[in-house]
Image: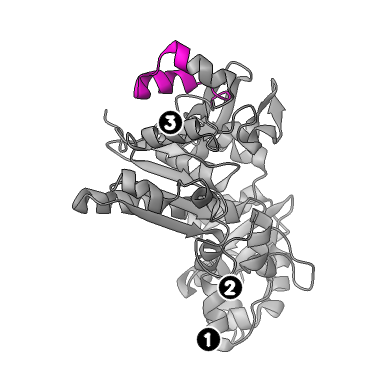
Amino acid sequence: MVDSLAGIRVLDLTRILAGPYATMILGDLGAEIIKIEQPLIGDEARGFGPFKGGFSLYFMSINRGKKSITLNLKDPRGKKIFLDLVKQSDIVVENFRPGTMKKLGLDYQSLKEHHPSLVYAACSGFGQTGPYATRGAYDMIIQGMGGILSITGEPNRPPVRVGTSIGDITAALFTAIGIFSALRYRDQTGEGQLVDVGMLDCQVAILENALMRYFSTNEIPQPLGRRHSSITPFEVFESKDNYVVIAIGNNELWKKFCQHIKKPGLIEDQRFCTNALRTENHEQLFPILTEITTQFTTDHWVESMESIGVPCGPVNTIDKVVTDPQVLEREMIVEVEHEATGALKIPGIPIKLSKSPGRVERPAPNLSQHTVEVLKGLLEMNETEIEELKQDEVI
């Protein structure tokens, strides 16, 4: 079996989350990822918990399958090693503040002189241009500035952070998409290019109907808690023993639902006969439906809604997600073995390709685990040269 990205070599200068997640995607699909870390310190994420056997599981979850080398890019010898590696690679990915790589003389404009077909991806808080370009940013900052905090949570309550680092992860996904696009362009023209992704841009891109509601009505969208802004009923309801999501996306499903719950009068009720009216009169409809949903368990609703073709699902806690038969069947929980942690379960690959499906085979690397291998194998250095670089903390 040939991997989709077999033969593609990536120099990964990224740290923490957005950049490492993007390069993890490339690695899962077969690219060779050489993670370049600061000597003795490494990626800051190595210090983030939880830990097992002294190894960061946070780091493990997004750096699987990569090779780790250490390299001091401020030392001329370290810079030369990096340039030599660039000449033998296809992609460089970094997520420093704009200007950092230029100070080192290793930005895209400098590197393309050495390697015109290089794809250089820069993922930063605000992108390479604009008045905020040199500002630092973390996920929470971007969630706030990008508007998603303002529409998440319950009405008339303080803003609520989305429960996962959606600012970082969205940027990672767009970075990977940009890299794939640039590789395709290179295949056609032989030329590399800069992939410039800003986390704030990515948050604006996923605001979808919040933006459209504002542009069409001039009203500022507010948090709506557990319901959809423009489809009703399409929300989380309380059940007899927990919560359940019932999503009725059209009038045919509404009719089936009303007949099933023995409330046919709701179908012709002038307050609820169209989706627009149901949404407009949500405050009147919600208590009517809640009185019914609380009479039965979540399992009852999932099974009964499935029987009539109405989309429905439980509100799973994480322990239920990782044992869900659909999740397991799709190999979304996989196991890797690491000398420090032993056997460890981590997320699988969500992209299912029929010919080149990708795979998770190796855990995240120890710091500098592959330095000697890479320097010997790619740059043909000998033991004496490598030992001297170690003594001088270049590697």
Q: What stretch is highlighted in magenta?
A: 365-385
**Among the two numbered marks 1 and 2 on one chain, the one whose residue lies closer to the N terminus:** 1
Residue 359, above or below 101:
above
Mark 1 vs mark 2: give the one in front: 1
Q: Where is residue 10 in the image (x, y as percent from the top left)?
A: 40, 37
Three-letter code, disc 3: Ile
Q: Position of residue 285 (x, y in %)?
A: 67, 76
The front one of 20 and 226 is 20
Look at 39% across and 49% down and name the residue there: 110
Residue at mark 1: 216
* Mark closer to the observer (3, 1): 3
* Rendering quarter of residue 34: top left
* Image x and y of residue 160, in percent: 73, 61
Pick the residue in front: 210 or 26.
Answer: 26
Kind of element beneath mark 3: helix
Distance from the alpha carbon under mark 1 to that under mark 2: 20 Å
Q: What is the residue that sits farthest to the right in this orientation?
A: 157
**Hey, what amino acid is under mark 2?**
Thr
Disc marking residue 81: 3
State which tag comes first along the sequence, 3 or 1.
3
Find disc 2 in the rendering and name its residue: 232
For the residue labelled by badge 2, is the local secondary structure a helix, a strand or a loop? Answer: loop
Asked where in the image residue 195 lies, by quadrant, the reply is bottom left
Is 367 one of the magenta-colored residues? Answer: yes
The answer to whether residue 44 is magenta is: no
